[in-house]
Amino acid sequence: MSDARPAGPFGRARTASRAGMPGLAAAVLLGLITSAAAEPYLPEHDDVVLERLPAADDPRVREARRLARALDRQSPDPEAALEVARRYVDLGRSEADPRFFGLAEGVLAPWLDAPDPPPAIRLERAALRRARHDFDGALADLDAILEVWPKDVQAHLDRAALLEALGDYAAAEQACIRVLRLYPGLVAVACLTSARSLAGLAQPSYDALAAAAAAPADDPTRSWALTILGEIATRLGDMASAERHFREALGSGARDVYLLGAYADLLLDQDRAGEALDLLEGEERADGLLLRRTIAAHRLDDPRLAAWRDAIRGRFAALRQRGAATHLRDEARFALEVEDQPKRALELASRNWALQKGPADASVLLQAALAAGAPEAAAPVLAWLADKRTEDVVLERLRRALDGVSS
């Protein structure tokens, strides 16, 4: 996830609006990724729900649609179009729903291929490029923004998020240091400790972020910081602290797809599939959450398994038909944990690794290499992890298992 996800996961914060600069409110970037070419998909069961549309009564959706209807499609006002696009991008992130990104692209159509769009529009275009995994294009847009607005906190944050997802933790740290100089506070500390925690400094990063997140309780970025704390604690093997942080973050009340996925993964990793199902009750719209429900149902032999398995297969097939490459890691997990196809899982996980690199991406590839009896396929990941000095109890356990197979 994870689009994520995201992704080493990273929070998107908007700095308060000034001189055209975007504004500060945490949300979670996706880090989820998908597949490649397929035939049209037909579900095996008539009652399978392949998709659930965004709730029409969601006030955020209603307001975005109202503003979109007011746009002059022949000659849209850039400021009005930007406002609508921002709302759709935020909905796409919070709901992990690519359809909102498509709506944002429709609104920004006059500027999608423009060589030099207004910087504020370029910022949203960078987000859309990242959503469809055009990482080079997204970085180019962010670099161009920073040439014009070198003090744009949002662009630095988005750049750090993207570099972290690509596994370039040193460059992500430098982007976070710029945030710290421009906008000191919890958002900067979360940015910096997220990157450093993945590069051999997990415990000091955890300690620093825990101190920063202690107060104030009403900071809008605190839920995001708590999610990062939960993930660092998980990698350190402190599952009790990880669960405490995830539960506190959930207590903020805002629905957070990335957080739900991270907490569900913690429960699944501890063989608490029933609790994972309870946590994700009613969560079928986001592909990553439906995948985790399917994994939990598979482990429990839940009678709903067949319908959920059929639904997630259909979603992956639809993404392949559209030529998307945004759920490779999720589909690798599905092939490995539900369909018992380790060789296909390894192929998907390897393609995902070519796109993005983080603990979750490493984990699924190492698991698939182990299950497929192909320890040599894990070599690039193991070398990369050693170079980055990433500390992770799960990855260390998988590394030892692969050493045992190789020896």
Image (cartoon, grey):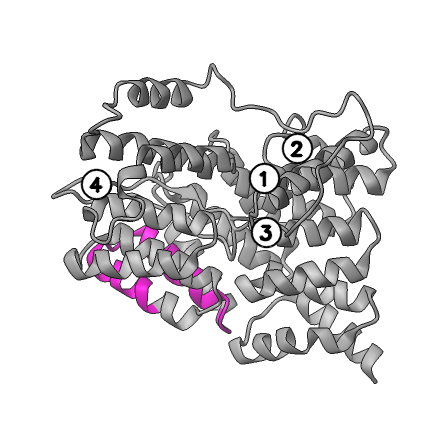
Among all residues in the image, which is located at the extreme top? 57
Pointer 1 local density, CA inside 10 Å: few below 14, some 14–19, many at least 20: many
Q: Is residue 392 visible?
A: yes
- Is 184 in the magenta? yes
In the rendered image, residue 76, in percent from the top left (x then y), is placed at 21, 29
**Helix, strand or loop status at disc 1:** helix
**Residue 220 against residue 55 in the figure, above or below:** below
Q: Mark 2 to mark 1: distance in Å?
A: 7 Å
Circles 1 and 4, Cβ within 8 Å, touching? The answer is no
Q: Residue at x 49, y 53 (%)?
A: 9
The label on residue 241 is 3
Residue on which the image places disc 4: 16
- Is 318 in the magenta? no
Under mark 4, the amino acid is Ala
Compare residues 108 and 208 and report the one nearer the observer.
Answer: 108
In the rendered image, residue 157, in percent from the top left (x then y), is placed at 33, 55
Q: Left or right: where does residue 211 sit relative to residue 232?
A: left
In the rendered image, residue 211, in percent from the top left (x then y), is placed at 40, 55
Magenta span: predominant SS is helix
Q: Looking at the image, is mark 1 or mark 4 earlier in the sequence?
A: 4
**Helix, strand or loop status at disc 4:** loop
Q: Mark 3 to mark 4: distance in Å?
A: 32 Å
Judged by depth in the image, the label closer to the viewer, 3 or 1, is: 1
Q: Left or right: where does residue 367 sit relative to residue 131?
A: right
Q: Mark 1 to mark 4: distance in Å?
A: 27 Å
Q: Looking at the image, is mark 3 or mark 4 earlier in the sequence?
A: 4
Q: Is residue 208 visible?
A: no
Residue on which the image places disc 2: 280
Residue on which the image places disc 1: 260
Q: Looking at the image, is mark 2 or mark 3 earlier in the sequence?
A: 3
Circles 2 and 1, Cβ within 8 Å, touching? The answer is yes
Under mark 1, the amino acid is Leu
